[in-house]
Amino acid sequence: MTRPHSAAAAHAPVDDGLAEQFLSFVADPAFPCVGSKAALARDAIETHVFGRMGERANDAPLLDALGRFGARIDAAGEGDSTVRSCVALFTGPCDTDERRFEALLWSQLQRLHDLDVRRGQPWAEGVSRDPDDPSFSLSLGGHAYFVIGLHPGASRLARRFARPVLVFNSHRQFDRLRADGRYAKMQAATRERDLALQGSLNPNLADFGTAPETRQYSGRAVEPGWTCPFRARRT
């Protein structure tokens, strides 16, 4: 499984088995996301370990790792059907409730975006820059991502992990899955498994283009009038 690249390792603590712990979490038979399980089966979950979430020292190495990850997806071509994820694992904090984690998540994503803008990267094509638009997707390194947050205080069992985690999934990858008919099947299977695990479906779940995906990032059941704190800058 992919380890932190040198740039990330310079700012990260020694990996004490956190990556293996996360992969075991995904491998657990009760874990509902079939896309993650497919990625695990193909050795396609790339892990990077960082210090505490919210530390600015994480920003550049994480953005660098995402740039390499997006470039590899682009280079794989349209025929590549492998499900891949880039996972940022943070050593702390371990006492987050859902609102604190939500604030940390959006602060982290905003700083990554601001650094991306300073580096002159354009917004990804085909997705909105407005986080309250159903067609929004987070752009980093010119690549569009859907982000999934996990943390110790999550109310959803599928999002409850011992440390804070950000999982970056490529929207280009989702487009390919939709094109070959796998996406709907994987989505239905995941929701069925999540219902069996939790006893209810995540109230924020929505298909891309029907509601802002930002409502799903942190895992908190956000209010009907919730607006995303993220703001896209102009290059």
Image (tube, rainbow, N blue to C red):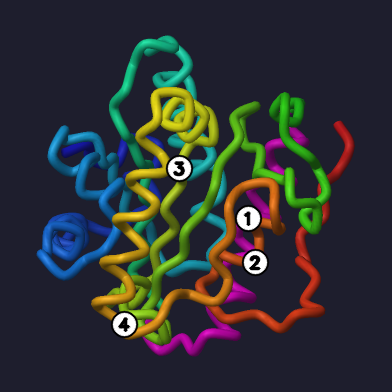
Instruction: Estimate how packed mark 4 is, as few (under 14), some (14 to 19) or many (20 or more) residues with alpha carbons within 10 Å.
Output: some
Q: Quadrant of residue 220?
A: bottom right
Q: Position of residue 61 (x, y in %)?
A: 47, 42
Label 1 amino acid?
A: Leu
Q: Which mark is residue 213?
A: none
Q: Determine the CA span between mark 4 and mark 1.
A: 28 Å
Question: Can you identify the residue that label 2 sits on?
Answer: 215
Judge depth for marks 3 and 4 and give the one in front: 4
Q: Which residue is mark 4?
A: 198
Q: Which residues are magenta?
A: 94-119
166 vs 42, left or right, is right
Amino acid beneath label 3: Asn
| Sooner in the amino-acid sequence: mark 1 or mark 2 | 1
Q: Helix, strand or loop at disc 3?
A: strand
Disc 3 target residue: 169
Seen at 26% across and 63% down, the residue is 32
